[in-house]
Image: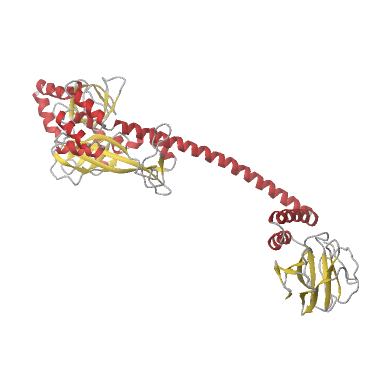
Amino acid sequence: MSELHGLSGQWVNTMVSNEYKADNGNSATSSLEILTGPARGTVCWLSGSMLDISLNDEDMIYVAEAGDEALLDGVVARLHRSGDGYEIEARERNSLWINGERIDSKRLQQRDLIEFGDKGPLSRYRIHRQGDRLKRSLGDMLDDCIDYTRVSRKPRIARLQRASRNFLSDFIVESTILFRIIVVIALVALATIAYQQYRSSIHLRQQADSSAHRLEDFARTLTRTNQELLRPSDLNRLRQELGHSLSAAAERLELLEQRSAASTRIIAEATHAIVFLQGAYGFRDIETGRMLRYQIDAEGDPLFTLRGQPRLTLEGQGEIAERPFTGTGFVISKKGVLLTNRHVALPWEDDTSDEALIAEGMEPVLIKFLGYLPGIEAAFPVELLKASDEADLAVLTCREVAIGLPQLNLSLRPAKPGDEVIVMGYPTGMRSMLAQTGDSFLAELQQDESLGFWEVAQRLSQAQFIQPLASRGIVGQLSESTVVYDADTTHGGSGGPVLDIDGATIAINTAIIPEYGGSNFGVPVEFARRLLADAGVEIE
C-alpha cells in the first residue's frame, strides 16, 4: 500500500513499512485509508494539532496544516487533535458524511467511514498503536467492500460493481502468491463440491420421479382395488345371474351333502369355526409420521391424474388411502386363537407396489382388522400374535369374542396321496356370500345404497349370510413343505382349513395356480404346531 502526501503539500508515493513507530511522541498515530477514487489503496498519515482538508479537480484529498495557502478549491473539512485522535468538522457549508450520515462535527472513532463533499472519495479513519502491522489482510479487503456497499450513496448496482472490482484488484495486488494459490485451490474445491451437489440434485430429482411413479403404481393398485368393490351395476348383475352360474356354489354344497353323510357332518361342525377376515391398511412416512392420503381440492373433492388415478399426498386433510383386503381364518382354541396365512395378516408383503413404497421410507400401518363368525352378528377386532418366518402362516387372536368358541382340531397324522379333503373358506370375499343372499337382499342394498366395504359385511352378518363355502377333492402330491390337492378355491379362501375325512385339519390353504385349476397348495399342519409353540399357545 502506498502512502499519500506529506504535510508539505506535495503528493508522495512511497512503500509503507510493516510496522509504524510514532515519531511525534504520541503513542498512537492516525491515518486516512483512501477506499475509492484515483488514490484508492493509498494512506494519508495525519500529524499536527489542526489540519485542513481540501479536494482537487480529480477528487483527490489534500491535507495540510490549517492556514496553508496551497489548499486547493477551498477547505471542505478541518481536523482538530483530541487526545490520541482527531475531531472533524465541516467547513464553508460543505457536506461531510460519517458512516453514511451527514454531520457537522464528530470525534472520529476507529474505522469510521468519511466522505468529503458530495463527490469526494470514501476514506476510513484508523488509529495506529505502536507496533501495529499495516499490511491489509483478506478480512480488511472484504471489510472495505462491505463498508463501501453499506454507506455509499451511489445506486445499489453501481455500489456492487465497484465493490467487486475493488476487491479483485486488492486481492491481486496485495495478497501473497501462496495465498492466491490457496484461494485458487479452495475455489476449485468449491467448484468440485458444487458439481457434486448438482449431480446429487439430479440424482434426487430422479429418485423423486421414481417415487412419483411408485406412488402412481400404488394409486393404480388402489383404483383396481376400488373397482373390485361393489357398485350398483355389480348388484344388478348379481341379481340377474343369481338363478344361474353364481348359484352353482350352493348347488355344489348341496351335492356334496347328498354324496356323503360324513362330509355333511364335517361341514356343519366346522362352519361355525371358519372366520371371515376383513381389513384395511395404509402407509405412513417414517420420518414425518404423516399418513398417505387422497389429495383433495378446496371443496373437499378428490383429485385425479390425467390417467384417472387418484392423486396421493402426505399433506392435507384428505381421507387416508386405505387398501382393503379379505381372507379366511379358523378357530383352533376356545380362548379365541386363530390360524391363517401370513400373507393375509401382513398383506403388503406380497404386493410389488407396496414394496416400492416401503423402499421409499414409508411403513405399512394396519388401520382396521375385523373378523366375522357364522351365528355372531357383531364383528370383532383381530390382532396378529405371531407370523411364521418359515411358512405362510400366522397366529391371530380375537379376545373380545366370548370364550367357548367352536374350534377345529389339528390332525395328528400326516396326509397321504389319495386322501379325501374338504377345503373351507370365503373365496372371492363378499361376492360369493352375496351370490347366495337372494334378490330381496340385493334390492335392499341398492335401495339403501349400503355399498361400502365395511357396511356390506355388516349387513351380511346381521342377515346371517356370513357362511363359508366348502369344496371337496383329493390329495394329489405331498412334499415336506406342501400339500397339493384338487379341491376348488380362489383368492379370499387363503388361510382356510384343509380338513380330512375325520374333520381334523391337515393343512392350511395358502395358494392357487390360476393356470391349472387342478392344483392348489396348503401348508402342512406340522408347521402350524411349531408356530403355535413359538407363540406360547397351548392347544386343548
Seen at 27% across and 39% down, the residue is: 279
Q: Considering depth in this image, is 409 or 511 the residue closer to the camera?
A: 511
How many numbered tags mark residues here? Answer: 0
Q: List x then y, in percent, for residue 228.
A: 29, 31
Tell me which corner region of the image, top left, top right, bottom left or bottom right, holds residue 331. Answer: top left
Q: Considering depth in this image, is 218 or 262 the residue closer to the camera?
A: 218
Q: Is residue 294 above or below residue 421?
A: below
Q: List x then y, in percent, for residue 85.
A: 77, 76
Q: Is residue 140 left or right of residue 447?
A: right
Q: List x then y, in percent, for residue 372.
A: 19, 39
Seen at 29% across and 38% down, the residue is: 345
Q: Is residue 234 above or below residue 186?
A: above
Q: Is residue 219 above or below residue 119?
A: above
The C terminus, quarter of image? top left
Q: Is residue 427 visible?
A: no
Q: List x then y, in percent, for residue 513.
A: 30, 23
Q: Considering depth in this image, is 302 or 190 the residue closer to the camera?
A: 302
The N terminus, quarter of image? bottom right
Q: Considering depth in this image, is 312 or 127 the residue closer to the camera?
A: 312
Q: Residue furthest front?
A: 93
Q: Is residue 348 visible?
A: yes
Tell me which corner region of the image, top left, top right, bottom left or bottom right, holds residue 13. Answer: bottom right
Tell me which corner region of the image, top left, top right, bottom left or bottom right, holds residue 477. Answer: top left
